[in-house]
């Protein structure tokens, strides 16, 4: 077996990699990343209906590639997040507008004119001072970001907005129930008569909502395996997160935070690597392909995966986590960088293998700081040598609606995915995997491993 492991890398680089050239192409890269970052995905927020659809699409790609399931009878590694069930049909609201001695009131129809967006500790109030504003109002946006308020908030919103659609009827939301908080309500734009409005109007509300019911909201990581030929019980994990931050404050009329670079590019890389390597056939070690949800909510998907893995983490020789491949800095086209490069020999192995495919590993000023900022950190805390590989920058479109497919460098991205393929083949074929060095061990000890 040792002789086989020494010979396989050369054979693969000489022949099998060339046979996969019709899988990782610019056209297929563009097609995948465009689907993930399309407006129809509504920013792929964790817990949203759109991310469920995205997960099913990824699972279908894995199945069509001929990969194996890692979880019995499922493409999904499931875990719950604490959430709440809200019911828009059980809302009663009367808004009162006062200007001087004049008071005007208006009753909002439940689920037709008004819906509940956030969970709150309080479930009713009588003639409480409240805020009424358009979604675009900057003060209201800060309250929405906070996720809770000390007074009822009524946000006027267009019926076509994803917030309004998701708050229909009985529905589940994620998030904590904060002490003393009042709900944030969504009000259909046009439901409040113009007669209620005035420059000096003061608003109050008498309102009631159904008590929120605590619920476990199921979430899905998507997982597939290419079983190994010689060391089937050893794994290289190739991962990326397929969630983003959903919808939010509109910028230039666009409220969808598409997350094309972050991290539809990484998810695209995982999918195309899975398809290319599956077409080539087994490597000595098994390769697991994992698309995580919940990275944007604190790495919750990868944390759940590492707490209840479908295979022993002690058998994982390395985690190659992929983040933001599509927006290179000027002069760095076709190059990539590794987070925490000084903590193990992972970066050196990546440089050697990816260099054979024409992709240079370079430095990045925030590489050390970003080591614990993505899903590789969940693996690292469990002892697995795990780093993220990126090929871009923290550009001004990061976490903005302007992170769109049109701004990606598809040619650069395709070259880097080719380099990643060479690295994964190397990790799955070499005699020994990467190891933490003294600096890496101390870093993990400082963070409470």
Image (cartoon, rainbow, N blue to C red):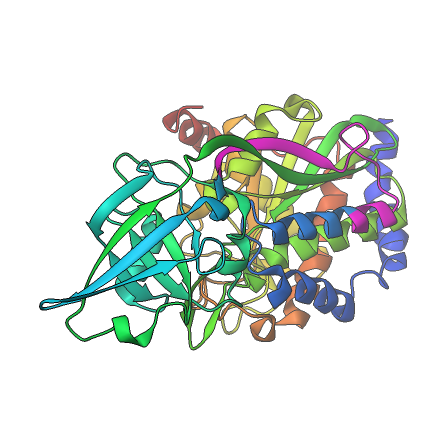
Q: Which residues are magenta?
A: 60-85
Image quadrant for the N terminus?
top right
Q: Residue at x 60, y 70 (%)?
A: 405
Q: Is residue 369 above or below residue 210?
A: below
Residue 55 shown left or right of residue 155 in the figure = right
Residue 227 shown left or right of residue 249 in the figure = right
Residue 200 shown left or right of residue 368 in the figure = left
Q: How many numbered callouts?
A: 0
Q: Residue at x 54, y 41 (%)?
A: 375
Measuring from the top left, give residue 37's x and y in whole percent: 62, 63
Q: Residue at x 84, y 54 (%)?
A: 17
Q: Which is more toward the observer, 438 or 419? A: 419
Q: Which is more toward the observer, 280 or 158? A: 158
Res 340 visible: no
Quadrant in which residue 208 is drawn? top left
Measuring from the top left, give residue 234's x and y in whole percent: 75, 27
Measuring from the top left, give residue 246's x and y in whole percent: 51, 56
Q: Is residue 209 above or below residue 234?
A: below
Measuring from the top left, give residue 91's x and y in whole percent: 42, 47
Is 63 in the magenta?
A: yes
Quadrant in which residue 35 is drawn? bottom right
Residue 387 shown left or right of residue 106 in the figure = right
Q: Is residue 183 above or below residue 43?
A: above
Q: Which is more toward the observer, 314 or 268? A: 268
Residue found at the far left of this picture: 100
Res 229 visible: yes
């Amino acid at each position: 077996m040792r002789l086989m492991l020494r010979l396989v890398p050369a054979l693969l680089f000489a022949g099998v990699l060339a046979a996969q050239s019709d899988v990782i192409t610019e056209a297929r890269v563009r097609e995948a990343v465009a689907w993930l970052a399309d407006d129809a995905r509504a920013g792929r927020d964790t817990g949203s209906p759109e991310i469920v659809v995205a997960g099913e699409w990824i699972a279908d790609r894995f199945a069509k590639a001929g990969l194996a399931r890692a979880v019995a009878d499922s493409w999904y590694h499931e875990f719950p997040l604490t959430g709440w069930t809200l019911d828009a049909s059980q809302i009663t609201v009367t808004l009162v507008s006062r200007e001087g001695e004049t008071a005007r009131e208006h009753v909002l129809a439940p689920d037709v004119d008004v819906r509940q967006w956030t969970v709150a500790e309080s479930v009713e109030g009588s003639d409480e001072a409240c805020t009424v504003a358009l979604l675009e109002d900057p003060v209201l946006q800060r309250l929405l970001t906070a996720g809770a308020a000390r007074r009822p908030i009524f946000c006027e919103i267009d019926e076509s907005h994803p917030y309004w659609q998701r708050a229909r009827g009985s529905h589940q939301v994620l998030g904590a129930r904060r002490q003393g908080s009042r709900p944030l309500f969504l009000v259909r734009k046009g439901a409040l008569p113009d007669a209620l409005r005035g420059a000096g109007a003061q608003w109050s509300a008498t309102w009631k909502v159904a008590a929120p019911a605590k619920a476990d909201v199921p979430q899905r990581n998507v997982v597939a395996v290419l079983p190994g030929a010689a060391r089937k019980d050893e794994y290289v994990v190739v991962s990326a997160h397929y969630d983003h931050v959903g919808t939010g404050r509109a910028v230039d009329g666009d409220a969808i935070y598409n997350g094309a670079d972050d991290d539809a590019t990484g998810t695209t890389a995982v999918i195309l690597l899975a398809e290319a390597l599956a077409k080539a056939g087994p490597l000595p070690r098994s390769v697991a392909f994992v698309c995580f949800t919940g990275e944007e909510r604190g790495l919750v998907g990868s944390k759940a995966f590492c707490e209840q893995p479908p295979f022993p983490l002690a058998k994982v020789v390395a985690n190659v986590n992929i983040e933001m491949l599509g927006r290179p800095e000027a002069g760095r086209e076709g190059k990539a960088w590794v987070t925490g490069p000084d903590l193990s020999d992972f970066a050196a192995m990546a440089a050697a293998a990816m260099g054979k495919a024409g992709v240079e590993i370079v430095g990045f000023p925030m590489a050390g700081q970003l080591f614990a900022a993505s899903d590789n950190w969940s693996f690292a805390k469990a002892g697995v040598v795990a780093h993220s590989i990126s090929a871009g920058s923290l550009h001004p479109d990061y976490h903005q609606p302007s992170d769109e497919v049109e701004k990606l460098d598809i040619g650069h991205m395709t070259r880097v995915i080719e380099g990643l393929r060479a690295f994964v083949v190397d990790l799955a074929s070499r005699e020994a995997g990467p190891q933490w060095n003294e600096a890496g061990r101390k870093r993990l000890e400082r963070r409470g491993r």
